[in-house]
Amino acid sequence: MTPTRPSDAERMDRHYRYQRFIYDLTRTHYLIGRKHLITDLKPNPGETILEIGCGTAWNLIRIAERYPAANIYGVDVSNAMLDTARASIKRKGLARRIHVAQADATAFSAADAIGIPQFDRVVFSYALSMIPGWQEALEIGAAHIAPGGSLHIVDFGQCGRLPGAFKTALFAFLNHYTVTPRPDLEDACRRVAATKGLTLSFSRMHRGYTDYAVLARKI
Ligand SMILES: C[S@@+](CC[C@H](N)C(=O)[O-])C[C@H]1O[C@@H](n2cnc3c(N)ncnc32)[C@H](O)[C@@H]1O
């Protein structure tokens, strides 16, 4: 009998079983650009924000603190990560403002998972580089942008303006954590923008360490 491939949920639960306890402490210094993304969201009061692949809720908590009138949601495939997210959200007294649910980004309907079909801001933060079916996830994320809303992506870039030895060492380190920076992220964003009638702004920040994209839908 052919062994079945473990699902993303099984893989991520196994991967983060122990790491989730030190995740926030250890990732702060190399998941660069998350604060830039949060500053750029600028929701209007009462608007909705969804992070897909929200992990331990590091972003969700900072988004809630920065935008006290926004309604904030997160989904992740890993129940282990969501346990840590819920504990952190509760500790910060934000349980009434941040709602999280289990969902696979590659087969996801927010209407089913959360009861809301579209969001004013949708976020992927260092998640697409960990999702094997990231192109489907990107398409699905874009389908969840409300009219007048935007999808914001921050992730590892190709380190184009950094020394080659740095890139080799970084990518070997990331590979160990099942992270694959996507060389074709910009092309995929362009394709999704064209097929869904969105505008795209794509920047390579920090000498190419960080890719940052915003896909926006007109009203
Ligand atoms: C590197 S962490 C990033 C967490 C958070 N976004 C941050 O910036 O700290 C990647 C997250 O993506 C989640 N993930 C991986 N595959 C997924 C999938 N198919 N659907 C939803 N989430 C997924 C993992 O469980 C993990 O929490």
Image: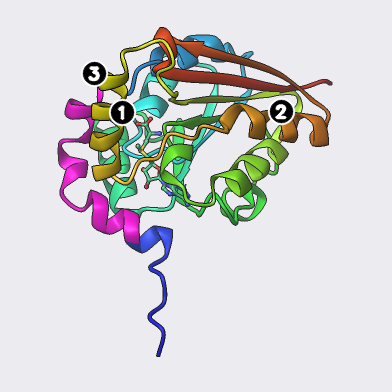
Q: Which secondary structure dominates the residues rendered in magenta?
A: helix
Instruction: Give residue 7's quadrant in the image.
Output: bottom left
Q: Amino acid at mark 2?
A: Arg
**What residue did someone put label 1 on?**
93
> In percent of the image, x 21 and y 43: which residue is there?
20
Q: Around disc 2, counting alpha carbons within 10 Å, would you say few (fewer than 14), some (14 to 19), or many (20 or more)?
A: some
Q: Amino acid at mark 1?
A: Gly
Which mark sits nearer the N-terminus, 2 or 1?
1
Observer able to see residue 34? yes
**What residue did someone put label 2 on?**
190
In the image: residue 172, left or right of residue 211: left
Rendered position, 126 above or below 110: above
The front one of 175 and 32 is: 175
Single out the mark in the foreground, 2 or 1.
2
Which mark sits nearer the N-terminus, 1 or 3?
3
Q: Around disc 1, counting alpha carbons within 10 Å, would you say few (fewer than 14), some (14 to 19), or many (20 or more)?
A: few
